[in-house]
Image (spheres, grey):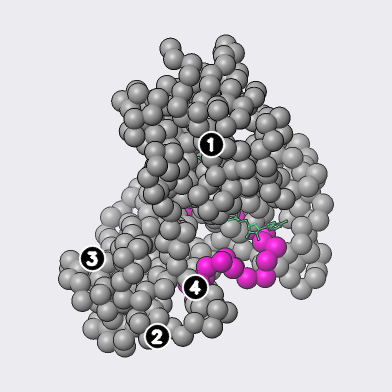
Amino acid sequence: MSKNFDVVVIGGGPGGYIAAIRAAQLGFNTACIDEWKNEKGGPAPGGTCTNVGCIPSKALLQSSEHYEHASHGFAEHGIEVKGLGLNLEKMLGRKNTVVKQNNDGILYLFKKNKVTFFHGRGSFTKGDANGYEIKVAGAAEESITAKHVIIATGSNARALPGVPFDEQLILSNTGALAITEVPKKLGVIGAGVIGLEMGSVWRRLGAEVTVLEALPAFLGAVDEQIAKEAQKLLTKQGLNVSLGVKIGEIKAGKKSVTVEYTDAKGDAQKGEFDKLIVSIGRTPNTIGLNAEGVGLKLDERGFIAVDGDCKTNLPNVWAVGDVVRGPMLAHKAEEEGVAVAERIAGQHGHVNFNTIPWVIYTSPEIAWVGKTEQQLKADGVQYKAGTFPFLANGRARALGDTSGMVKFLADAKTDEILGVHIVGPMASELISEAVVAMEFRASSEDIARICHAHPSLSEATKEAALAVDKRSLNF
Ligand code: FAD
Ligand code: NAI
């Protein structure tokens, strides 16, 4: 096996494995090192996303949504379910199978693209502009060299100060995806993306869920109108969200956790939970890289410092994904991985940060791209807005899911689309049309004039675009 590579990627999550595949496609002799282990100690490439993030969370969101439909959603369709039961062990088993299929898929892709895979921890031993030496500590220890290094070491869950994760009672995303008995009372600290997604999973399966959020506004980064609608819908489903809280002492007993906090009015409160998920953001992971040893610069928040092209301060060393600035999203990591591989090949890799979509996979889903109305106001941009409710969409009625809306924001003069915000069924799929439109700098009139299939949820997108010019046809 060759030990000298053109490109070595450290980390096999969506940033790293995609960078490795693209580099190999471009003709580089490429290796990827990843240390994630499956339950048997074998390799499990795919990073946080595949193992304890995007994929298992979406598997459980899907299963729990089926369960909720069977519990009380099917009745309106005239489908009567008797003797409904929950086999949580099987549900978790299915999730694990989905994860394994993805791990195996990546190993297959490495083979197909002739990427050499090393299972173990990669760390710099020495190097300069002429090349780097990297130690791989796995079942055996080996040393490899690289002309270019791409660091894609991802992120870890942030713990509350003095409250480490034990993954039994106090859970990070890892434990939150592997609870073996539905808790009666589940506490969640942080009403962000993980809090709302995992809170939804366990609420659907029967837990009484209390979400405690420090900020006074619900989903502060989301367009206010959409966030308000989402808050209303999620609260109606039974997710108890308390905003503006200040978390005090957290005590873990043998079987439960007590959380003391002050509510928005300043009153002291106490919650006792069977499990507590702490989802208050994530921190970049540079542990074990020996960044200091080779003089790799980190920024003040611990991210690897990079320029707009993902170049670090070291020659021929690049960094992508969660370990660098920008949104912590799998598709952002992938785009950066591809762009860096192409830059190494002398091409003009490009990532457009203005058109990175966000999706929160609650039910209904929340998805957006571009600017929010509050951002446009703050920036003094003159804009026009158009909204269309799913209540007026035939396909949504047929589906029995009419909650939410599509909202367009367009420049008042040029009509260029500046932002699209959706809360509603299949928002994760619908947002792609808006991303494409914005990437091509389309106007709302462009979308309004495109023929959309009937009956489809995407007609709500067209109608919201028409509403920008106050001429929606079905509302
Ligand atoms: P990671 O996926 O974290 O991969 C880094 C890899 O590097 C890991 O395998 C790690 O073991 C390995 N590694 C680290 N250091 C070393 C070393 N020294 N040597 C060898 N290997 C090393 N994003 C979305 O876009 N959509 C979603 O639906 C979504 N859902 C999520 C749900 C949850 C619960 C969580 C926690 C995250 C979710 N995310 C989602 C975020 C997404 O998982 C991350 O943005 C993404 O995984 C970042 O990719 P990455 O390649 O930068 O890092
Ligand atoms: P987050 O940043 O989305 O949300 C954290 C929330 O915790 C914020 O609302 C914050 O105000 C709150 N918070 C922080 N400190 C607190 C405290 N002491 N007390 C109470 N509340 C506090 O982070 P989260 O949910 O941990 O997810 C991490 C990242 O993972 C996300 O930002 C996202 O990038 C990624 N992710 C993406 C998903 C998707 O794309 N669907 C799904 C899950 C995660």
Q: Which residue is mark 1?
A: 316
Q: Residues within 10 Å of mark 2 (few under 14, many from 20)?
A: some
The kind of residue tagged 4 is Thr
Q: Is residue 347 visible from the viewing direction of this image?
A: yes
Q: Residue drawn 32% across and 83% down?
A: 467
Q: In the rendering, at what x and y percent does residue 343 appear?
A: 43, 43
Determine if the magenta segment contains residue 219: yes
Q: Which residue is mark 4?
A: 372
Q: Which of disc 2 and disc 4 is earlier in sequence?
A: 4
Separation of disc 3 and disc 2 at Cα?
28 Å
Element type where label 3 sits in the image: loop
Circle nearer the viewer, 4 or 1 = 1
Q: Which residue is mark 3?
A: 456
Q: Residue drawn 37% across and 74% down?
A: 417
Q: Tags 3 and 4 in contact by the CB under 8 Å rule? A: no
Q: Which of disc 4 and disc 3 is earlier in sequence?
A: 4
Q: Which of disc 2 and disc 3 is earlier in sequence?
A: 2
Q: Is residue 41 visible from the viewing direction of this image?
A: no
